[in-house]
Amino acid sequence: MIDSGLTAWLYKQIYCRLIGSVLPAHWFGPRPPEQLLKAEGNIHLEIVSHCWNYAHLCVYQLSSLVKYPPKNLTLTYTMYYSEEDQGTVKLVNKFAAMQIEGIKWNFQQMPTNELFRRAIGRNKASLATEADWILLGDCDLIFHHGCLDSIGTELAKVNCRLAYPASEQVTELLPADHALVNLPQDQPELVDIDPSMFHSIEVTKAKGTFQIVHGDVARHCGYCRDLRFYQRPTNRWRKTFEDTAFRQVIDDEGIALPITGLHRIRHQEKGRYAKNSKISQFRTSLRHIEDKKPKQGI
């Protein structure tokens, strides 16, 4: 039976209210390990993202890794994609051929109906990771000049279950016809951003695109591994409600780290939803409302 958006919302409410409050968190997954191994020397970081009809933004992320590779950490970059998304396939082929010191590419093709449920790929990556830390993010994050080294420096100072960046640099909400989000996709090329177009906002919690999980926790707990609803393939891209449940399962809200150089292009129209569909129109309207709220500066 195909679940609906309402069903997803109801599951979120149930999980968020029950896990760790009415019902013990370990009923929904294994307890995270009490002792966490602290990395020595250079940090090994794994970044995990998903891309579905987002090649026009993912190219900024991949380009930032190539242009600003890490110096004080080793990076594994894992991205899940589907062969049905030809724009992303071309992007993967372009960057997989590049050999960048300090970076190991790990492009993973998966069935489209599994890609649509982000927690499935995150769970697979978490259980399999060999990294000290695993950053579960979205494919529109841009790791600009010094960002990866800033992550390495800050992670070397802590030994916790969950962390997240204290701030990010974002653009204004760009219209669908803006040049930044209309790059040619037939032959993807290296691109860059103008940092002066971005302003700083506060990140208040380890939400879906900003979860940096200790490797020991990831390998032991997975990502919503035992919450069957979040491991079920689906017929379309699903709103990613599972990050709250994950924090409840590992019983940790995360600590904020002063990471620098993290950027994100904000835009009105999401490529992963069908163009002009009701859900696309609704989410565009919602982003306009959110954009009018007072911004929290750093």
Image: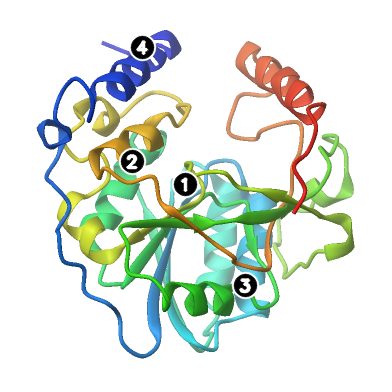
Percent x, y of residue 12: 36, 21
Which numbered tag is attached to residue 147? 3
Question: For the residue labelled by badge 2, is the local secondary structure a helix, a strand or a loop?
Answer: helix
Whole-angstrom CA distance, mark 1 to mark 2, is 8 Å
* Quarter location, residue 14: top left
Q: Is residue 193 left or right of residue 68?
A: right
Whole-angstrom CA distance, mark 2 to mark 3, is 25 Å
Q: Which residue is mark 2?
A: 247
Question: Disc 1 marks which amino acid?
Answer: Ala
Question: Disc 2 marks which amino acid?
Answer: Arg
Mark toward the start of the polypeptide (3 vs 1): 3
**Which of the colour schemes (rainbow, by chain, secondary structure, one colour) is used?**
rainbow
Q: Could you classify mark 3 by the number of other residues whose Cα lies within 10 Å: few (under 14), some (14-19), or many (20 or more)? A: many
Q: Could you classify mark 1 by the number of other residues whose Cα lies within 10 Å: few (under 14), some (14-19), or many (20 or more)? A: many
Question: For the residue labelled by badge 4, is the local secondary structure a helix, a strand or a loop?
Answer: helix
Q: Camera-side residue: 259 or 56?
A: 259
Circles 3 and 1, Cβ within 8 Å, touching? The answer is no
Task: Note whether 238 is above or below 224 in the view shown.
Answer: above
Circles 1 and 2, Cβ within 8 Å, touching? The answer is yes
Percent x, y of residue 228: 19, 28
Percent x, y of residue 162: 36, 55
Asked whether residue 194 is in view, the answer is no
Percent x, y of residue 29: 15, 39
Query: In the image, what residue occupies the spot 44% across and 46% down?
Result: 82
Task: Note whether 226 is above or below 109 in the view shown.
Answer: above
Question: Disc 4 marks which amino acid?
Answer: Leu
Q: Which residue is mark 4?
A: 10
* Quarter location, residue 163: bottom left
Q: Is residue 8 left or right of residue 150?
A: left
Task: Note whether 235 is above or below 165 in the view shown.
Answer: above
Quadrant of the image for the N terminus? top left
